[in-house]
Image (cartoon, rainbow, N blue to C red):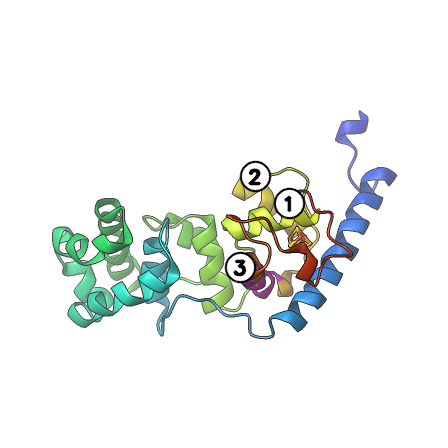
Amino acid sequence: MSAKKQSAAQNPDEEKRLKDKKNLALEIIARLKKEYPDADCTLDYNQAWKLLVSVRLAAQCTDARVNVVVKGLYEKYPSVAALAAADVEDIEAIVKPCGLGHSKARDISACMKMLQEKYGGNVPDDFDKLLELPGVGRKSANLIMGDVFKKPAIVTDTHCIRLVNRMGLVDGIKEPKKVEIALWKIIPPEEGSDFCHRLVNHGREVCTARTKPYCDKCCLNDICKKNI
Ligand code: SF4
């Protein structure tokens, strides 16, 4: 067997690398818990299907704007059945302020129709079934699994990808699915969902994208690899 094909368990260097990353991850998780005790999704929802709608609208839009726009949408269409029966053009007119109105409206309509026809208006608590829904990718499916069903989840959004690279939890990986797979190896499954929410908090407040990160006031300053 070539060295490349050796598993972590057979390759001492890889084993040590993973162990170091796991230890770093545990320390980061502990510190972020202290820093951000409440690890909540910033999209407002009180039913699972509403989180599906919001997460689709949140692509290239702020959560704050989505939270405003969905109020109007749910006033007019208060259930999966109502939204599934709505004209796509009407959905588009309402969700337009979130950007990409046409494709988002089309996906939301198709998704609600599938929920209604295949699942009796309910959201399935199965990752692969969620992935089959129109407009639902791994990030959204993980968010639903973690937040709605309280199951292990790793949500690799833009903050997560930027921060875990900077921190040194992953090494130069930018593709969301690859980051997710790398993180599953080092993050305790039960911590994944809250950890990712805290990365969003930290990414917005301290380890920012548009300005230089505020390392001098960061609770991870002494352990972060600062791959900026
Ligand atoms: S030390 Fe700097 S680069 Fe590392 S997480 Fe904190 S702000 Fe980001």
Percent x, y of residue 13: 85, 38
State the quadrant of the C terminus: top right
- Label 2 residue near ligand 1, CB within 8 Å: no
Q: Is residue 1 visible?
A: no
* Residue 26, picture quadrant: bottom right
Q: Which disc number belongs to residue 200?
A: 3
Magenta part of the protein: which range? 192-201
> Is there a contact, CB below 8 Å, between mark 3 and mark 1?
no
Q: Is residue 101 visible?
A: yes
Query: Which amino acid lies under the numbered mark 3 shown in the image of this protein?
Result: Val
- Between the C-alphas of marks 3 and 2, the distance is 16 Å
Query: Which amino acid lies under the numbered mark 2 shown in the image of this protein?
Result: Lys
Q: Where is mark 1, residue-wise?
A: 165
Determine whether, in the image, residue 32 is placed left or right of residue 128.
right
Percent x, y of residue 84: 19, 59
Q: Where is mark 2, residue-wise?
A: 174
